[in-house]
Each structure stands twice: as structure tokens, then as C-alpha cells.
Image (spheres, rainbow, N blue to C red):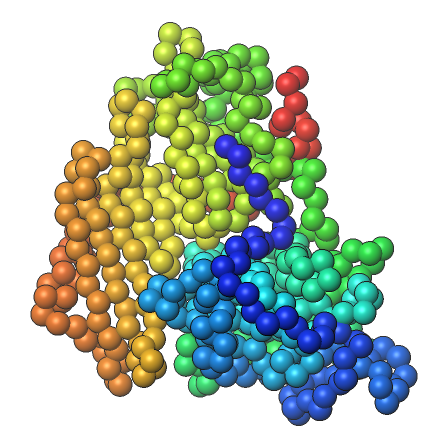
Amino acid sequence: MGKKIKAICLLFCMICSLSACAQKPGPNMDFKDMESDVSIASSQTPAQDMPPAVIASESKLTIVPSKTRVSEFTKCAGYTEEESDFYNITPDYIADNSEFEIFKDVSSTDSFIMYDGEVYSIGTCFGGFGLTSMALADLNQDGAYELYYTFSFGSGVHALSIGYFDPVKKEVTILDCPLQSHGHELMLTANESGDLCVNIAVIDEKMYQSFVDFSLEAQELIGTVVSSEDTITLHISMDEFIDLLGQDGASELTETVDTDYVFYLEDEGVRDNPVFAAFIDKEITACDAETEESRYIYECYEQDVFGVNYGVHYMAEDLDGDGEKELLILVQWDDIDGDLLVFHEEDGKLYQWETWEYFLWMRMSEIEYHGNGIFSMGGGAGTIVGRYNAEGKIEYIVKCFRDFGYTEEDVRWESENLILYKDGQEEKELSWEGIYSHDDTLEMTPENQANYDEINTIMNEIWEEIGEGRRIKNVGYEENAKKIPLDELLNKQ
């Protein structure tokens, strides 16, 4: 499968050259005066030329977007002006004390760091708020400030995350922080002791204009970011987090990233079929229905692909309606990537059907099985409904995606595109777009309105036809999932 998943984000290819930084950010820089809402913390006795240990907002952060150097960023990142709507959201306290520049798409919330002529993704933002707060700190004590930041992603499950960019190594690292909460974000602050603090925060609804124009208010302290034995880690008080937000708002938290273990779950009844059991136990192989290539179950996985809180989920469902169940293996590689492997038994042998790649296309996807081989996957950005047919091939039923953004006059627009399929082939495509008036009414042309109404009718008919489904969660959040050593999953015995 060849998927390469790492804790660091992808480095975008350079297509142009920007002017080099005159000076690396960090404690060796001259410290400039800060605004009143910025906290300047030092863990030692201040000296006239001694910079602060941590530079962060104190209790409230207001992001003011601009188009400064956006054209340089889009060229560097490989975007065009037509396909994106990025803004520079770098706060003054970051710009005044470093060479970091932060850019965010007002529609997708995708967020990036530009530094020394190169662009770095902060991590997955799809379905969430994207980047929310920033701070400077030299926790690894190499003489240069790292850029720390909080961000969120996920519409079904709103995941809260923390990452940092190391300007010396020129790499992004996402800290292990599988927290989730609806209606809350994380915010970085500093205390008088010079600690980089993590607070629960909320968006100020009165100040909110868009994903790039908002104010964030810090609430209770729940943890700190620290450096120990040359490793930067996140220390969170889960008791405090649960007390504040309730058990439903908190997920399991591990103190360190441990990719030597994966989550493993077998649904009840999977082993009722002895052929399934023998395949799971690595005793027999399965044959690819097209290539006729045989392989053991451990050959379906790759050792370097699993991230934290991910793994495998074994299920058994009758997908083709012949009265016999197929073996389903949902392989969740990381937060935005998962594949569905399906195996059909015939005369005591297993044959692998077409792999549904990117079956899990974002961690927050709401995946449901509706029977008759039909699955639906959706989130805030849209919905996909498809099925396995009797030949083991994937047939899409509908794909429907929404998008939104803001014009140069700061008018909010929204659009939707639907592709309807019949027998696996495209049958009809519809789309609409509209803008919001001052009283927040969605306005569109009569032609767009007709398509809008038809799309709603089609989707309602599909939901009525396929009926309610059974939710398939991320395996890391299933109550009955257990942790097993990665070697146990991959070993031949």
C-alpha cells in the first residue's frame, strides 16, 4: 500500500524562491515591546538583553487577517489565487519576535507556516477550526524559538491538537493529544514561571467573523508543554479536563506517542466462520480476486503506517445478499486515512474483493453500514454513499460535497455539488451556489434554487431508501478495543 505516515507534516515542494531570513528567530533576537494582552514569561531573573522564555497571549487572542505576502505564500505553496482564499493571520507578537509567518484558508481552514522560503503544513484541519493560537518558546534550548500552536479538526468528532515547528530541524511535530470536545478549543498561554501552558478556550461569538477573523478567550488551565530528556511532550490533567467538559468530552490520553502498539477489535461472531478465524490467525492465505495473488493477513499491513490510537477492526457482514457473511477489515492508518478490506469465502477459500481505499477519509467521518453492502461516509464537508456489488466491486450511489468562503468584500458564499450514480456510472450532476445577505439569508438565482431543491429531494430519497445505519467508530474509541503490540499484528506466527 506504500502509505508513509509520520508525526511530521508534509513539506511542500518549492516552485519559487523567497528572500532569505535576515536572522533566525529565538532568544538571540532583540526583544521588542508587546501588546498588553501578551504574556511575557521568564523562568530566570530578567536581564536587559535577556529575552523571555515564552511569548504567548495572556488570556485573549484576537486574530486580524490581512493579505500581506499572501501572493508570495501561494506561489511558494503551489496554490493559485483561484483555488484558494488564504489570509496572513500572524499575530504581532509572533511577527515582532520571529521570522515565522502563518497563513490560513478562510474556507477549508487549512493552515500553514512559511519560514525561510519554505512552507509547512501544521497538520490536519479538515472539518475543524484549523489553527487557533500560537506561542514562541525555546523549550529544546537550542537558541532558537520554536513556534507552538493549537488547532482543531473534525466535524463529527471535534479533535483538539497541539503541534510545533522547529526552525533548526525545519520540521513540524504533532504532539500526542487525542482530546475531543464540541464547542471548545485549546489555547496556549504563559505563566509567571515561564511555563508554556495549555488552556481550554472558547471562540468569542460576538467577535467572530470567519475562520481567519476571530477572538479566542482562555479558560481553565489543563496542562503544560515541557521538554524532558531532549523530547518535547504534552502533560495534560485528564481529571481536570473531564471535570470541566464531562466524560463525553474527553478521550483516552496517552502521555507519549507509542507506535509500538495498535488497537485491535474483533466483532462478536467473526470467528463463527472457521475460514475467517484461520485467516485472522495467519494459518491460511487469501487470493486476490483479480490478480490471483495470495497473501497472508499480516501482508495487508505495513509496519510504518500506523499512528497513535489507530489499528484494525474485524467485522462480518453479508454484503452481496447471498446469505453468507464476508470478512471486513477496517484498517485505520491515521486520522485522515483508512482502508476497507473485504474477503469473500467460496468453497473453503478466501478471495479478496476490491479494496475501498480512503474508506476513512477523515477521522471525524461518520461511517455507517446500512445493510445490503451499503456504506455512508460523511462530515461537515459532504457525504459519500456507496456499496459493494455481487462481483466484489465498489459502486458509488451518490457523492455530495459542500464548500463555502468569503468574497473580497467579505460576503459569505456557499456552494454544493452532487453526482448521482446508476449501476456505478454517473447519471446526473447538479450544483448550486449562493451568497448570504445582511440578514443571513441565503440568496441565489432561480436556476440555482431549482438545483438546491432537487439536491435536497435526491438526498432525502436516498436516506429514506437505505434507512438508518450502524455507526462504525474509530477503532481507538471503541470501548471493547484492546491494545496489542504491533509485532503481534505483523509477525508471521
* 300 relative to 52, above or below: above
Viewer-nearest residue: 8 or 36 = 8
Q: Tell which of 446 and 350 is nearer to you.
A: 446
User: Is residue 281 left or right of 403 when viewed as pictured?
Assistant: right
Residue 337, given in percent of the width and then of the height, sits at: 48, 44
Q: Which residue is the extreme one toward the top?
A: 347
Asked whether 312 or 334 is in front, the reply is: 334
Position of residue 142 in the picture relative to residue 459 (left or right): right
The residue that appears at 45% across and 79% down in the rendered structure is 67
Q: Is residue 347 visible?
A: yes
In the figure, residue 174 lies in which quadrant? bottom right
Across and down, in percent, residue 129 comes to 48, 67
Task: Name which quarter of the figure residue 29 lies in.
Answer: bottom right
Foreground of the two, 385 or 291: 291
In the visual, does 403 lie left or right of 333?
A: left
Q: Residue at x 45, y 50 (%)?
A: 362
